[in-house]
Image: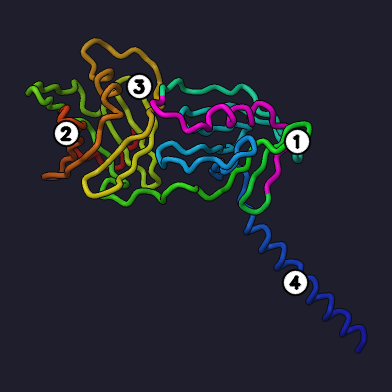
Amino acid sequence: MKAIFLLGSLAVVLAMTGAIQAQTSQQVPPLEGTSWYATELAGEPAPKPDPNRETYLQFESGGRVSGSDGCNRLTGTYQLDGERVAFAQMASTQMLCLTSSGTENPFRDALKNATRLTVTRERMELFDATGTRLAVFSSESPASAPPSSTLAGTSWQLVEFQGSDDTKLTPDDRAKYALAFETSGQLFARIDCNRGRSTWRSSGPSQVEFGPLAITRAKCPEGSLHDRIVRQWPFIRSYVMKNGHLFLALMADGGIYEFEPIANAKP
């Protein structure tokens, strides 16, 4: 009888231990594949980000890491041995942001000087060799939720550009100029010979704004609409859907880009 009681007690303890471990494992998101958003940098709270310019890191398989410092996108490598971490070969886009979020330098310094990484539940921290905390990240974005809009989950290819001075420009191949609006707020683009990635948000009916565009830098052939689109990218402010087509309008009546839908496409 005593043996049965002891076996029963042991079973209960093991079951409780397993439940606690399962609960703990559910509370700690995986390092890889999770977007880690900066909430503290250099001992100071990170400013509330624009949804189009969040400061974050994402660890990928194969020792790759990517993210954004709040202005430019970064890519590089990392090595992790227990809690010991080292970031290397960091490269970034060279966007000129008109307004600084103040996160760029402390974010890069944190990656440069980090030697220790810890993850507790939804919180990741980076420390230097002296134990000073360089940065705190959260797996939950402090910015607004992904945009709710009829644009979410749609893909389009360019039909023409109509300028305010009645200038009309058409692409030599519509498929070379394509946009894909992800439900997550990401935006993928093909602009002639280059491919890019950005973000988008819609703060109200018919309103849309694009974030900084990270794009490859191949030289497109003469007559391409590439340079015009890249130059006007930050000035797109509104949209209309009419007769199945998407019309993106530039601010100050600068012109309108007309797109037609494409199915199951990502530029």
Q: Secondary structure at mark 3?
A: strand
Give the colour scheme shown. Answer: rainbow
Residue under label 4 = 16
- Amino acid type at circle 1 is Arg
Mark 1: which secondary structure? strand
Q: For the residues carrying marks 3 and 1, which lies nearer the camera in this image?
A: 1
Quadrant location of the C terminus in the rendered image:
top left
Q: Position of residue 255 (x, y in %)?
A: 15, 28
Q: CA distance from mark 4 to mark 2?
A: 61 Å
Q: Residue furthest top?
A: 222
Q: Earlier in the sequence, mark 1 or mark 2?
A: 1
Q: Which mark is residue 194?
A: 3
What stretch of residues is rendered in magenta?
97-119
> Which is more foreground, mark 2 or mark 3?
2
In primary-sequence order, the first of circles 4 and 2 is: 4
Query: In this picture, is 239 found above or below 267?
Result: below
Residue drawn where x is 39% and y is 24% of the image: 215
User: What numbered label is drawn on residue 84?
Assistant: 1
Q: Is residue 11 left or right of residue 134?
A: right
* Amino acid at pointer 2: Glu
Question: Disc 2 designates what residue?
Answer: 258
**Decide: marks 1, 2 in contact (CB < 8 A)?**
no
The quadrant of the image that shows the N terminus is bottom right
* Circle 3: residue type: Asn
Q: Is residue 241 left or right of residue 63?
A: left
